[in-house]
Image (cartoon, coloured by chain):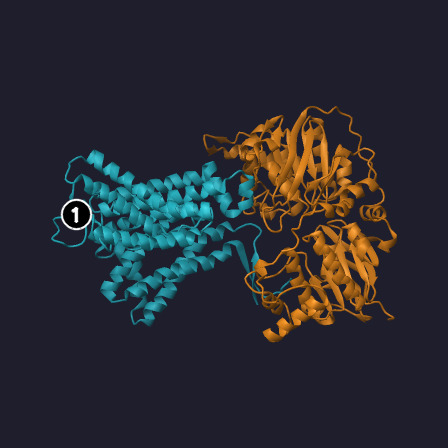
Chain colours: A cyan, B orange
Amino acid sequence: MIRLEKRPTPSRGWAWATPIVAVLATMVAGGLLFGALGSNPFEAIRTIFWDPIFGEFAFYYRGQLLVKAGPLILIAIGLSLGFRAGIWNIGAEGQYIMGAIFGAAVGLAFYPMEARWLIFPLMVIAGVVGGYLWAMIPGILRTRFNTNEILVSLLLVYVAEQILAWMALGPLRNPDGAGFPGSRNLGQYASSANKELIAGWGMHWGVVAAFIAVIFAYILLSRHILGLNIRLAGEAPRAARFAGVNPERLVLLCLGISGALAGLAGLFEVAGPAGQISIDFNVGYGFTAIIVAFLGRLHPIGILLAGLLMALTYIGGEAAQASLGLPASAIQAFQGMLLFFLLAFDVLTNFKLRIGGEARA
Amino acid sequence: MSAPLLELRGLRKAYPGVVANDDVGFTVGRGEVHALLGENGAGKSTLVKMVYGLVRPDAGEMRFGGESYTPGSPHEARQTGIAMVFQHFSLFEALDVAENVALGMENPPPMRELAARIREVSETYGLPLDPARLVGDLSAGERQRVEIIRCLLQDPKLLIMDEPTSVLTPQEVDILFETLRKLQAEGTSILYISHKLEEIRTLCDGATILRLGKVVGSCDPREKSARELAEMMVGSELNPPAPQAHDLGEVMLEVNALTVPPASAFGTELRDISLQVRAGEVLGIGGVAGNGQDELLAVLSGEVPVENDKLRFKGEPIGATGPNPRRAKGLLTAPEERLGHAAAPDMSLIENAALSGWVRMGMVKSGFINWSKARAHAEHVIKDFDVRTPGPGNAARALSGGNLQKFVIGREILQKPEVLVVNQPTWGVDASAAAAIRQALLDLAAEGAAVIAISQDLDELMEISTRFAALNEGRLSAPRDAAGLTIDEIGLMLGGAHGMEVAHIHEEAAP
């Protein structure tokens, strides 16, 4: 009989090893899946994990890596603070959309004025405000009426998607666009463009913001009293109250930070890689960031690495679809396996596996 | 009717560091209501867990109906004819009464038949209960009826009840007692665990008194006074309180006519509590758990804010402030529950030292924590209070209960509080460490701090208190000088108030 035995102290070794073991297990299970679909498993894994960085077309893919990882890391850092405190913002996707709409609207309002020093910073602020306000809805509903922030924030994603469609077809539609849905291209408007900072690297202001967020979150969690309070609230709510933490203020703060960072990610995306507000602007970064946050063990450095890894599976997955003809759903299942294995192996951090022996009451 | 129904001989159960039961033996006759009496921690729960098959004794033997009885599981105990009603209910709120009853049965009959039987039993025993109602809508007393009916449907020969009245209103207690007498008249034996003396005198035919895991006496409670029972329970010689010859200073903390509604359905209401503590004294607050101790501590610590002028610290109103402003002023608290309330289980001792210490120990500067100061504080506590741990980096949950208790008490004492409130300061701590903690509390008072010690351990309170008050059903008796207080008077303060309680109760019992 296999038993789980609680460790007196969480294992540090396993806390580090879990993500690595989870990635390896995902490769094995994913290989079996791809094999069952009729592809060569080794080739598929190589296409996903190796080729984008070291393969023949790596010069193209490498730039994509940061473009994809930037928003994932930025959003996941915000989410991780709330997750640590036991506050579950599942609606980062909606906050991402609202940040993009707010920021794009500000940029478009100034079109065609030439004043980048004014317009771009205003757009950034508007993006933050958009995401923050959208996250305050579940926050205030929870603190005032004790609603569940998981459900409210999730459902608001679909509201945000409707607003996005309306914006793309209505108020923000390009007047010179011959009636096609979608806004003017912000990337082609010098005052609002979020351009690549170093050609070919995929490094834009959103990626810079993500790195800064990693550093700030690291300092906050390890050195700041607020970070201690956030961890306390998640691990032992009564002890947090004893330590003087106001739970309602913490809910608003954590939802606010995660919303603001998601909005920021949306703004940088719409002004840069995406370029315009369109019906299909959002591609699920807000949801994938949840996986990134957990894959990174809710630790800022871990999230940085997890964001890069996740971006790699996106890019590699696309390459595998193109070159090996794997279906998109197989790639999604593959990404899902990563979270599954991570959570499964995570048990070993706090529990020992005992095989055999007598069970005691 | 030759052999007694249940016979226990030489039962022993030891846990690491503590002997919960040692050479315990007594008998329960057929149709007898037998009381198991003792303070918290005397070993009552361990004993009944052995009888109910939840815990295996290390030594000794049990006989049931004259035959050897070694239950391996509660399932076996139930088949033998033993049923138990626990202090904490195990019910699903989202299911109805009949479904909950079915979940606890070995072979539940079809629902309609079961509902009919529940009605029948509830009428026979005067336990009104509708099988179709949702448990979530029931009062505490009604929930207990569900548990009792679940037991009665199995037709037990012996019914064990663990502190059954702790969540009941006096009216509900009356109903319960009628039911138990009816059961007794039908020949069912009842093992009744309580520390409420008056209840036991009204209900029980026999009593066994446990103290520190050993049987210290048995008697017919109807022939004893509450005073005599209390003496047996706490030991006839209550240590005479240590004479504390120092002058009392100014009033440090004052509570004025404080009433706080219960936070949850099972919480206790604090009713019209007034108290004063002066510099240099230890105010001991005695009482059985669940009579408002946790609630009182939460109000004093600032976790539950109240009207600002209900609480005064050196004359200054502080009722509406949170824990940290109070710490800054010098009012510190140590809650009863070590893991999860006083300390975060998965955090290191360093982090746990910062948890309550950062305000007073200057560990935080413009929001940033000085971890070396936190480590120094943790190491100081570990050294001065002899906390056994490999180092301050260990998680709180890795410490034994007693060691963690030393840590969370020491953590507050070393912050040099002006007022310290402790709840169960020596709970689960071995005798010598408990003495050290008590001495530290006395030293603190001698240095001019005011100490409020909430405890269930009367010996402890008599040893350290300057004045003594009893907390009973959320009311605090008028404090009296501890010197010269007799056991009789303490017994009256603790248990006697129950009799008078009826007059105060509003119609909150009937749903």
Disc tally is: 1
Give the x, y percent position of residue B62: 79, 65
Give the quadrant of the C terminus of chain B: bottom right
Q: Image quarter for residue A113?
A: top left
In the foreground, A309 or B4: B4
Give the x, y percent position of residue B3: 85, 69
Q: Secondary structure at mark 1?
A: loop
Give the x, y percent position of residue A355: 56, 64
Query: Is residue A314 left or right of B456 when viewed as pictured?
Result: left
Query: Is residue B23 left or right of A13 when viewed as pictured?
Result: right
In the foreground, B107 or A124: B107
Give the quadrant of the N terminus of chain B: bottom right
Q: Residue at x 84, y 54 (%)?
A: B221
Q: Image quarter for residue A267?
A: top left
Q: Residue at x 33, y 72 (%)?
A: A36
Say if B366 sits above or below B393 in the image: above
Residue that badge 1 annotates: A184
Looking at the rendered structure, the kind of residue marked 1 is Arg
Give the x, y percent position of residue A144: 45, 45
Q: Is residue B411 visible?
A: no
In the foreground, A180 or A304: A180
Say if B55 sits above or below A39 in the image: above
Count residues near mark 1 (Cα–Cα under 10 Å), then give few for <14, some for 14-19, many for 20+. Answer: many
Q: Residue at x 21, y 57 (%)?
A: A56
Chain to which the residue tagged by mark 1 belongs: A
In the foreground, B372 or B415: B415
